[in-house]
Amino acid sequence: MTHRFSPGLSGDVSIDLAKFDETDFRAIGHEARAGLQYSPSGARVSYHGGVTRHALLGRNSASGEIAVRLGVTFTPGAKQAHDTALHPLRDHDPIPPLVRRGLF
């Protein structure tokens, strides 16, 4: 879920759950994420940061990992605003936690 705190500051929080039920692999993957993005009005640069924790539970469990991300994004050309009212939810992909552990 994404929320705009002010014209230039927005935050997002998400929780993903995915059940993997294969012949040789059974687990429930979960990922929790929180982040902030600051984009000054009219600027072509934005700053973002966040924390993500993911783990696998079940027969093929794997211990959790925490990742911290910080970044700066520069967009050349015309600045396009992201309207959180139009796009409050993000798409999620349950496969990256498997790939990071070398299981997929």
Image (tube, rainbow, N blue to C red):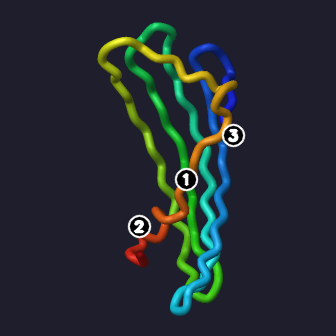
For badge 2, the amino acid type reads: Arg
**Identity, as a three-letter code, of the amino acid under mark 3:** Met
Residue 18 in which image quadrant? bottom right
Tag 3 near tag 1, CB within 8 Å = no
Instruction: Write down the quadrant of residue 17 in the picture.
Output: bottom right
Q: Horizontal and vertical percent for residue 59?
A: 61, 88
The quarter of the rendered structure image containing the C terminus is bottom left
Q: Is mark 2 on a helix, strand or loop?
A: helix
Q: Earlier in the sequence, mark 3 or mark 2?
A: 3
Q: Establish if 85 lies above or below 13.
A: above
User: In the image, which disc is placed on residue 100?
Assistant: 2
Q: Label 3, label 1: how many angstroms apart (C-alpha)?
A: 15 Å
Mark 1 secondary-structure assignment? strand
Q: In the picture provided, is 99 more to the left or to the right than 32?
A: left
Name the residue located 53 percent from the left edge and 29 percent from the top edge: 37
Q: How crowded is mark 1: few (under 14 residues within 10 Å), some or many (20 or more)?
A: some
In the rendered structure, which disc, 3 or 1, sits on the residue that comes first in sequence? 3
